[in-house]
Amino acid sequence: LPSTSNILLSMSSKAGDDAPPPAAEAPKPAFPEGYTPAAVWAPKELGGAMGAMNKPTAGARSEQELPVGSHDLQLYSLGTPNGQKVTILLEELVDLDPSFEYDAHYVDIFKLEQFGSGFVSVNPNSKIPALMDRSFNPPLRVFESCNILRHVAEKHGAFIPQDPHLRAECFNWLFWQAGSAPYIGGGFGHFYKYAPVNIEYAVDRFTMETKRQLDVLEKQLEGKNFLCGDEYTIADMSVMPWILCCEVFYKASDFLDLPSYKNVAAWVARIRARPAVQRGLRVNGAADAFGPPVKNRHSRKDFD
């Protein structure tokens, strides 16, 4: 006797013989008109403010040594949200400890200094910020902004909660930011502000995600002073500059309706009122959006 599976296979085959062929998939609209992805991608000039930075390969493009100051912590950075989160932490430590100092060296990414051999030796991914901790022998390199926050805060025993539940919550939000920021910066910010052409689909796609993230924060901050409750942590330092970026750098406050996120707005204002944050926003700055920039910072006297 034929098996059940053979009977079902025969029935399926006969049904398939009688079925109409599947309809051909309609071509997608394309921008530019007529564009279809090639079988194998090849690089081309992208244009726009960020175009010259982008290549499909890694590594140094020039020989360039990094400056070294006199303090244990040597930061190589720029006053973008990822750079600001680190300088905010460092300035908070300055206020906590009268003996603490650090050096922060300006990296001009538009001059492609992040592709110099010295910088690449600290961060092979060629992204700011990058840190050398010279209290170790040999010096310890630390890259990725959230990892720098973790390293420095743990080393100095500050801005990470001791309670295990709050500690876990702090790292939840720290790594939420690490995973979420590309949608704001490389997504929304790029297509809304920096791309050489306006693409409605791209703007809508990343605006929707940015507003979803704002709503995540709005709900989390309900009834709280900070992301983890009453304790100010590296999670707040990590997230806040990205929200500020939407207003100050992308000029998108009206477009995103930022004032409608009442809890977020109050939280940003609460953090910005801190003197260390006001200084941290100026370190390695290229413009006076947050006050006179301190392009290269070597001591607290640089703010005088």
Image (tube, rainbow, N blue to C red):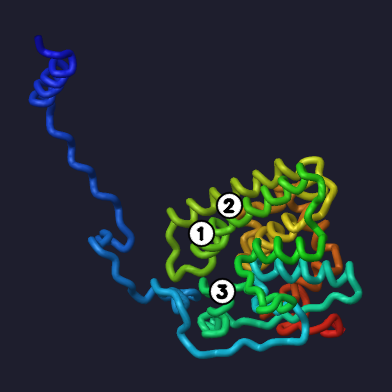
Q: Quadrant of residue 237?
A: bottom right
| Closer mark to the observer between disc 3 and disc 1 | 3
Question: How far from the left and from the top, in percent, is residue 61?
Answer: 45, 84
Q: Quadrant of residue 244?
A: bottom right
Q: Which residue lies at the image location 73% right of the left edge and 50% below the top edge?
A: 170
Q: Which residue lies at the image location 51% right of the left edge and 59% below the top edge?
A: 187
| Residue designated by label 2 | 210
Q: Which residue lies at the image location 30% right of the left edge and 57% below the top edge?
A: 30
Q: Which residue lies at the image location 70% right of the left edge and 61% below the top edge?
A: 150
C-alpha separation, residue under disc 3 versus residue under disc 2: 28 Å
Position of residue 121 relative to residue 143, above or below, is below
Question: How far from the left and from the top, in percent, is residue 160?
Answer: 78, 55
Name the amino acid, label 2.
Thr
Few, some or many C-alpha atoms within 10 Å of disc 3 (few <14, some 14-19, many ≥20)?
Answer: many
Question: How far from the left and from the top, in percent, is residue 103?
Answer: 75, 81
> CB of mark 2 within 8 Å of CB of mark 1?
yes
Question: How far from the left and from the top, in percent, is residue 84?
Answer: 70, 69
C-alpha separation, residue under disc 3 versus residue under disc 1: 23 Å
| Residue designated by label 1 | 187
Name the amino acid, label 3.
Asn
